[in-house]
């Protein structure tokens, strides 16, 4: 059957992902096949919505890239069955693939979009759960990329929520003329998540875990303190969207040696504008805290139910503390602690 589901697991998806110019991409002809389009019609749909595809979402291969890299991965037979090409192919980054989900229409496109969302999530989770089997520098690169991809997926979900809300208003006004069962399944599936995997509760509202921490950190104007005995490279990655010149201090005893010196140094080189110090927590803290702009009028303290590196794995709550005065002596004590030496 021409329009059957072509990708059913992460291994099949991985076979259609290439690394070009230092980023992972998918070929336009592969995506066209997945979505049930000819390559020509697929690219026509993209061109009709070209304002949505910036250079970090989609770019065209040079002749050298096409000849020397892709031809060794794509068989001549496969190329010939598509009738050849009159132009160099376009490739789409993961952000571009997510953007395609808002452009391509139809039942098959909806099904394939849902599959791609889930498979990209599986691949991200596999990298996080098996970071010990890849080099630390490779894990840093992959983690930085997947953090950006996760945020784009969250924005896509939120947009679907807004669309779903508007559609529901129309449904209510039209009564039996439109039934909710006829709506796009992807809207119903992603539109209003309660507490799906990878999300947490921030001040009583469900929010995707990584986005929740990034939203908190972007509120800081001068300083960010976190108190967390269990830290890792992901702890650092969540700071990358903080404002420039905000000083970050992590108070931790680095239980289980989760963060290594080489990871910390590589991250600091990758983000030289982000100043991060790590001090000992002193072995007296069980809970986790985030302190923003300490000793300023904008001071905020959040109590966290889990470490940021584990956010979303289980039901987790982050709550803004109304009275920060009780924590003053504890924070002042932390500031006197010695620097933590990483292994």
Image (cartoon, helix red, strand yellow):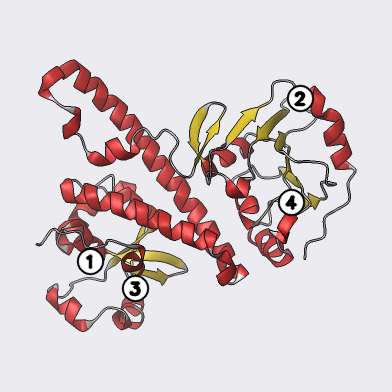
CA gap between label 3 and label 1 equals 16 Å
Neighbours of disc 2 within 10 Å: few (<14), some (14-19), many (20+) = some
Position above or below: 159 against 322: below
Q: Find residue 76 and report its image quarter.
A: bottom left
State which tag comes first along the sequence, 1 or 2: 1
Q: Secondary structure at mark 2?
A: loop
Front tag of 3 and 1: 1
User: Of helix, strand and loop, which one carries label 3?
Assistant: loop
- In the figure, 211 relative to 100: above or below? above
Distance of label 1 from label 2 (alpha carbons) = 56 Å
In primary-sequence order, the first of circles 3 and 1 is 1
Displayed quadrant of residue 215: top right
Q: Which residue is mark 4?
A: 276
Q: Which mark is residue 324?
A: 2
Ranked by sequence position, the earlier of labels 3 and 2 is 3
Residue at image coords 28%, 37%: 187
Cα separation, mark 3 vs mark 4, equals 40 Å
For residue 145, side relative to residue 116 (left or right): right
Q: CA distance from mark 3 to mark 2?
A: 57 Å
If you read the primary sequence from the N terminus, does the residue marked by circle 3 or circle 4 appear first?
3
The Cα atoms of the two marked residues, 4 and 2, are separated by 23 Å
The residue depicted at 16 percent of the width and 33 percent of the height is: 182
- In space, the residues marked 1 and 4 are separated at their CA atoms by 44 Å
- Please state the horizontal and vertical placement of residue 40, each as a whole percent of the image: 16, 62
Could you classify mark 4 by the number of other residues whose Cα lies within 10 Å: few (under 14), some (14-19), or many (20 or more)? some
Residues under numbered marks 3 and 1 in contact, where contact means CB atoms less than 8 Å apart: no
Which residue, given by chain and number where applicable, does mark 3 sit on? 62
| Residue 109 in view of the camera | yes
């Amino acid at each position: 059957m021409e329009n059957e589901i072509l990708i059913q697991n992460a291994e099949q998806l991985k076979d259609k992902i290439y690394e070009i110019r230092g980023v992972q991409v998918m070929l336009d002809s592969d995506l066209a096949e997945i979505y049930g389009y000819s390559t020509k019609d697929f690219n026509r749909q993209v061109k009709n919505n070209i304002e949505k595809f910036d250079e970090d979402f989609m770019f065209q291969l040079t002749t050298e890239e096409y000849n020397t890299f892709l031809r060794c991965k794509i068989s001549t037979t496969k190329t010939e069955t598509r009738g050849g090409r009159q132009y160099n192919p376009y490739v789409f980054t993961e952000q571009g693939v997510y953007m395609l989900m808002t452009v391509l229409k139809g039942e098959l496109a909806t099904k394939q979009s849902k599959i791609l969302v889930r498979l990209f999530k599986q691949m991200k989770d596999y990298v996080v759960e098996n970071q010990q089997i890849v080099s630390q520098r490779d894990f840093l690169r992959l983690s930085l990329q997947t953090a950006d991809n996760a945020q784009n997926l969250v924005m896509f979900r939120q947009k679907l929520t807004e669309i779903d809300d508007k559609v529901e208003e129309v449904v209510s006004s039209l009564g039996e003329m439109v039934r909710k069962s006829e709506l796009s399944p992807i809207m119903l599936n992603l539109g209003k998540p309660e507490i799906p995997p990878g999300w947490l509760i921030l001040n009583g509202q469900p929010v995707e875990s990584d986005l929740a921490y990034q939203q908190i950190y972007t509120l800081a104007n001068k300083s960010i303190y976190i108190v967390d005995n269990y830290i890792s490279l992901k702890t650092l990655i969540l700071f990358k969207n903080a404002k420039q010149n905000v000083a970050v201090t992590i108070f931790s005893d680095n239980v289980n040696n989760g963060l290594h010196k080489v990871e910390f140094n590589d991250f600091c080189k990758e983000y030289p504008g982000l100043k991060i110090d790590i001090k000992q927590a002193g072995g007296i803290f069980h809970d986790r805290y985030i302190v923003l702009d300490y000793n300023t009028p904008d001071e905020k303290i959040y109590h966290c139910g889990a470490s940021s590196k584990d956010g979303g794995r289980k039901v987790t709550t982050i709550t803004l503390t109304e009275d920060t005065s009780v924590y003053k002596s504890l924070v002042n004590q932390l500031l006197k602690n010695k620097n933590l030496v990483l292994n």
